[in-house]
Image (cartoon, helix red, strand yellow):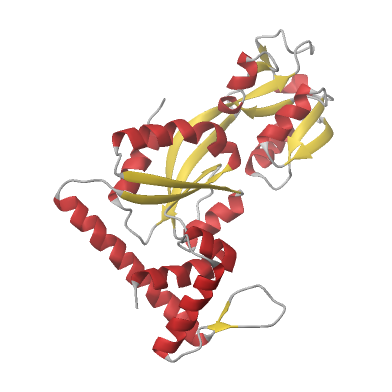
Amino acid sequence: MHIESLKVFCDLVDLQSFSLAAERNFVTQSAVSQQIRSLEERFKRKLLERVRGRRDVKLTPAGEVFYREAKNVLSAFDQLQESLRGLVGKIGGTVKVACTYSVGLHEMPAKVGEFMSKFPSARIDLEYSRTTRVVRDVLNGSVELGILAFPDPRRGLTIVQMPTDRMVLVCPPGHKFSARTQVRTKDLDGIEFVHFERDTPTRKATDRILKAAGVEVKKVAEFDNIETIKRAVEVGFGVAILPLPAVVDVEKAGRLAVVKLAEKDWVRPVGVIHRSDRSLSLAAKKFVQLLEEKT
């Protein structure tokens, strides 16, 4: 039995997908199935329930025990590798990171590049997800770090705050707000607005601030990602409130006007989350330290 087989098994349970587990481990789906069968033969226990017509991965009672202990073995193996690297002061290995689209697409490439230049023996494995999945993947151990906006305190998670993002108003060039240096929240009353979807943390914060100011906007559309919102504003759907790092490029290109919001409430906290019951690898610690720094 190889450590890789334990990892494939745990990835299959975490990802709930044979294809994704195969992709993560650079093997075929048939190889994943074969490794699961080999584990069951080795331990003479059925580890997974197989229901025809269903794609979900369900553990048997023996599988639940095996999954829990396999996670412990993998954690111990990672710690072994980390300790050996530490003997020679080498920072290496792969840090698995899940990040929300709204933070990752515009803020992570530069940070990952800086980290790789400082620690060429280490690697950041970055994947993009919605907020709920980022939290889930950190809790179940699929990734070591999660990066998201408006991180909520939660049992079992440690939050490390990153520099906050200033929220700004974006509108098409030629809009009545486009030539102003700043806009007050009350000026937005009755304005046609492009929103994030209701369940996103940024949308919830926006609604909260508007409500506190007694402002009602006219919702024209709502989308689940920043790029679609930017495009909708460009073509004249309405205005939007977005984090500054996400709109610097379109402002420079002259496609959107970016206007400061007067009130200090318009900020977006960003944080790194990780499991409280696990020690971070040395590479992960160095990456978190880099993310804490102001640019």
Residue 145 drawn at (x, y percent)? 44, 50
Outermost residue on the bottom side: it is 44
State the image quarter where residue 112 is shown. Answer: top left
The N terminus: image quadrant: bottom left
- Residue 290 in the image, given as x and y percentages of width and height: 36, 35
Which quadrant of the figure contains the C terminus? top left
Residue 234: name its quadrant. top right
Picture residue at 54% right of the left edge, 49% below the top: 152
State the residue in front, 167 or 92: 92
Residue at screen point 83% across, 34% down: 219
Q: Is residue 268 visible?
A: yes
In the image, 30: left or right of 38? right
Residue under the image location 82 percent in, 36 percent down: 221
Location of residue 243 by image quarter: top right
The residue at the point 47 percent across, 59 percent down is: 26
Judge from the rendering whether residue 45 lies leftward or rightward of residue 216; answer left or right: left
Q: Position of residue 66 (x, y in %)?
A: 43, 80
